[in-house]
Image (cartoon, rainbow, N blue to C red):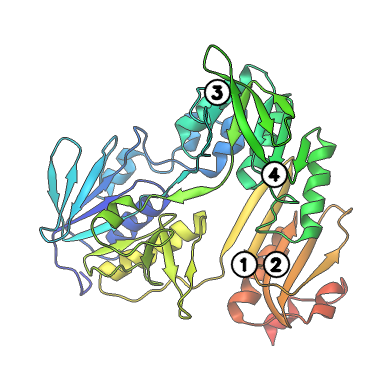
Amino acid sequence: MTAGLSPGRIVVVGAGQAGVQTAEALRAGGFAGELLLLGDEPHAPYHRPPLSKAWLAGEVEAAQLVMRAPEALARKQIELRTGVQVEAIDRPAKEIVLAGGERLGYTGLVLATGARARRLPLDQADAPNVHVLRTRDEASALAAALAEGGPLVVIGGGFIGLEVAATARKKGVEVTVLEALPRLLARVLPPLLSAWFEALHRSHGVQLRTGVQVEALEAGADGRVKAVRLAGGERLPCGAVLLGVGAQANDELARASGLACERGIVVDACGRTADPAIVAAGDCTARRLPDGSLLRLESVQGASEGGKAAAAALLGQDKPFTATPWFWSDQHGRKLQMAGLATGATQSVLRGDTAAASFSVWHYAGDRLIAVDTVDEPRTHLLARKLLDAGVWPAPAQAADAGFETASLLAR
């Protein structure tokens, strides 16, 4: 076994992408002790990206959603326990406390508790036809609501809201998307791409309202929301409402135990907390960068690579997660792929034509490339990740020139 952690028991709290990846990486790294994977949901670990798309549309079966079956984990001597609620961490005793009072000791503890959908501070936000989408059961409840066919009002013009809007239109449901900011996806995309997505959704019959404020959810005698009222008094009738206003890290366990939390459990690039016996990975974390700022990544890659880094840290190794972050979104049959983080860009360069079958947008801070967004260009997306990881890139004028061979930069 690798030096660092004595044989004993490692408990992984959270059975999503990060939890599963950490557990499997611990076994692959030589940990031979007891390994428990605790999930608070009743399901075996499953893939979350399809929830707003194929699962919501009814295009995949439950078996296709499974990430790791219990028997597959058992073959690696990973004990999966589902439907388990962890109520507290007793750090001095190195124990976690489960609902009902059971205590489990640990040699090492992994917090992979994920995130939950944010709710709005509005009356009726918990009405039965007001939905969020983060878990399989939440997606199934929304699918049942869409099957009823009533108008859907989506509050929030981010990725989840727009993916659900696209799926709902595919099922023939009337959809209105409400966004408080002046444009869609304003926090993650430049105006050029926001405008492109707005045109895409309008072309598929989605009603878009930007720069609007929701004032109230109006419920009927049956307790169900019948209309969304905007500031100014306009009422939008609805059969269901989706709140797509972001996610909140599930860091309460860590916070209550005295671990540093700020928009998530604060970790270094290796997933370490201030407690040498506790690491954290995935959507529940906020990584402290060398300049002191915090980076939160909510992505499959972040959960997977963060899990590998956290496992290595428990085994006494340094394998920091430093690769270029990447994300994707599927809407109305078009695929957006993002490499890097465009926050702080001073200019964005279009390569190709937004009216064509595919194109890309290259983002620079000064003359330094910091991110590339592609639409239906998977090869360019992979190239962009390589360029960003290698620290080489085309000049803005070269990126704008469709005839310039950007891949040649890697050979240099």
Measured as percent of width and height from the top left, residue 126 is found at 48, 28
Left or right of 284 in this view: 341: right
Name the residue tied to disc 3: 129
Residue name at image x 29 percent, y 66 percent: 29
Earlier residue among tags 3 and 4: 3
**Callouts 1 and 3 close, C-beta under 8 Å:** no
Residue name at image x 37 percent, y 67 percent: 267
Left or right of 378 in this view: 325: left
Look at the image and tell me whether residue 270 can be seen: yes
Measured as percent of width and height from the top left, residue 12 is found at 27, 52
Look at the image and tell me whether residue 59 can be seen: no
Residue name at image x 72 percent, y 49 percent: 184
Residue name at image x 84 percent, y 45 percent: 199
Name the residue tied to disc 1: 341
**Callouts 3 and 4 close, C-beta under 8 Å:** no
Earlier residue among tags 1 and 3: 3
